[in-house]
Image (spheres, rainbow, N blue to C red):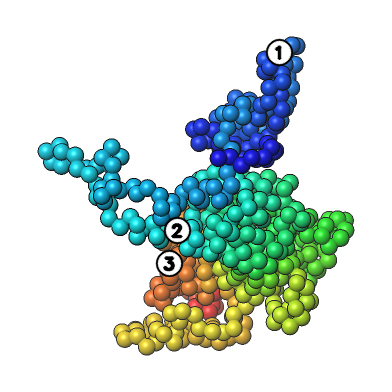
Amino acid sequence: MAHEQTWSIGERVRDEGGHVATVRYIGNVASAKDQSALYIGVEWDDPTRGKHDGSAIRSEDGVKIQHFTCTEGAGSFLKPKKIIRGETFGNVMRRRYVTMNEEMVSKDNKLDMEQAHVKTWNGRALPIELYGELKIRKQQQLGDLDRVTCRDENVSFAGPDCAETLPLCTLLDLQGNLLSDWGELASIGTQLNKLEQLRINGNRMHMPSLNMESFTAQSFPNLKILVLNTCGITSWSQVCILEKALPVIEQLSIAYTDVSDIESVLMAQCGGDARLVNQNLEAELALHESGDKSKLSEMILNDSTAYPPVTGFSQLKHLDLSHCGLTSWRQVLRFCRVPNLEQLHLTDNAIPDIWPMPPISNLPPPPPSGGLQAEEASSQMHPFEKLFYFSLSGTNIDSWADIDALNTYGVHSGEKKENGPSDLEKRDGVGWEEKEALEREAKLMDSSHCKQGVRVMRFSGNTPLISGMGASEVRQMCIARMPFLSMLNGSNVRVKERLEAEKSYVRRVMREIARDEKTAGPASPDTASPEIIQNHPRFVEL
């Protein structure tokens, strides 16, 4: 049964065939015979399903009337009776889960022959037997469930009985439902106050309904994981509203949205002067042309007035910004003061290069801010202090110097990583070359100048730097250039693999030195030109 309330702009609906659309217009239509009839103008998710762009031709004089605006071919005008509206959360749950008293599906442990049967070798039809139906039902009673997945259903409204329906729920997956109003979502969260994980990706939310009044810290007091991929976020200011309502959030995914305005939003929040931004852009351009990209990072990190960082998110560890319209590493640096950030996904953003972090001595410690207590802020002494994971697949990176720059991110405490020297030295059959590699790795871990570096990375897909290269070649190059990389594209980096990659890398550079016209004498680190040494910062060390 549909939730009894008036139609609203932004509401999500389905037709009888299951196709989903968003309500864009409510009223009479210029081309209708009955001008008093109510029509619902919708924009289909499938832009080829409609007939127009939200306009109609007035029958009296042939004038085109634009009732709403959408992509050509994505709009339709439908009578209300042709539309399936959303239901309350409780109604959908009760429809999907039966009680212990409902009629049995398998009578005498046998399913209905018309619904399910098998045929023998001679063509006889035999019923399928189902045992343990009551035991299965007992495990699926709503009052006992703590993890619920309800995808591609008609959940659109909270209703008053969410807590009564699922009192123990800690994980809720509502992907592909008909949610659109943030207030309704907040009501679900308020009632399900034990909720720790929520996935609503694919629900196209009506952004005007997102506000501080309806979405408060009481909405999701215990929520740690929130997935909002393809939910219609169009501004970083909307993410800032969400942050206020997510006091303990640890993982946030807003992939396939648009937060390209992050810098202007941050500047507006701190009352900054737009003219100051233009002046700094000129200085940024000059530094970029000089080739010293670490100075770019230093300028941004040292000037929080002209380049205000993201604040809040005190518990956030995992942030997915894949396909979010980012176009510069300057935007990425705005997350440098998120105190517990460990993983940053930047897949499919048009970021052209990576700026190295400057020496720590060139950066001031952050002041206590962003909701942190003074003692917590003092422990967060460096930008991106806990960051160890980057996902950079599908970016516009086109230079190996950008990969080298990742070695300057994430401050490590010098601990030995998994499968490090302390574990591997105990293994039998470790050859002298591997022991040498282990000793070199131990020195890297203990040296004061090399306590940084990304340890886990995803780097593949349509990226200019690796276009035309095989997967194994890309893997070898990344491993050799990144001394602390322990996992690449989901696969662990073993010591033997690192040794082979570094040997191959050294041979590659030696061949480059031999071909270089500036080389005087046999190919060696001593005869390599400064350009080659600059392009291969690990060569001398290896």
Secondary structure, mark 3, is: strand
Q: In terms of image quadrants, where is residue 328?
A: bottom right
Pointer 3 residue = 491
The mark lying in front, picked from 1 and 3, is 1
Asked whether the viewer can see residue 509, the reply is no
Callout 2 crowding tier (Cα within 10 Å): few <14, some 14–19, many ≥20: some
Where residue 463 sits in the image (x, y, percent)?
54, 53
Q: CA distance from mark 1 to mark 3?
A: 65 Å
Q: Residues within 10 Å of mark 1 (few under 14, many from 20)?
A: few
Q: Secondary structure at mark 2?
A: loop
Q: Amino acid at mark 3?
A: Ser
Point 31% across, 84% down: residue = 429
According to the picture, the residue beneath numbered tag 2 turns out to be 141
Say which quarter of the image contains residue 276.
bottom right
Residue 110, x across and y down, in percent: 25, 47
Residue depth check, mark 2 versus mark 1: number of the one nearer the observer: 2
Near mark 3 (Cα within 10 A), the count class, few <14, some 14-19 or many ≥20, is few
Q: Which mark is residue 59?
A: 1
Where is residue 490 shown, x and y percent of the image? 45, 65
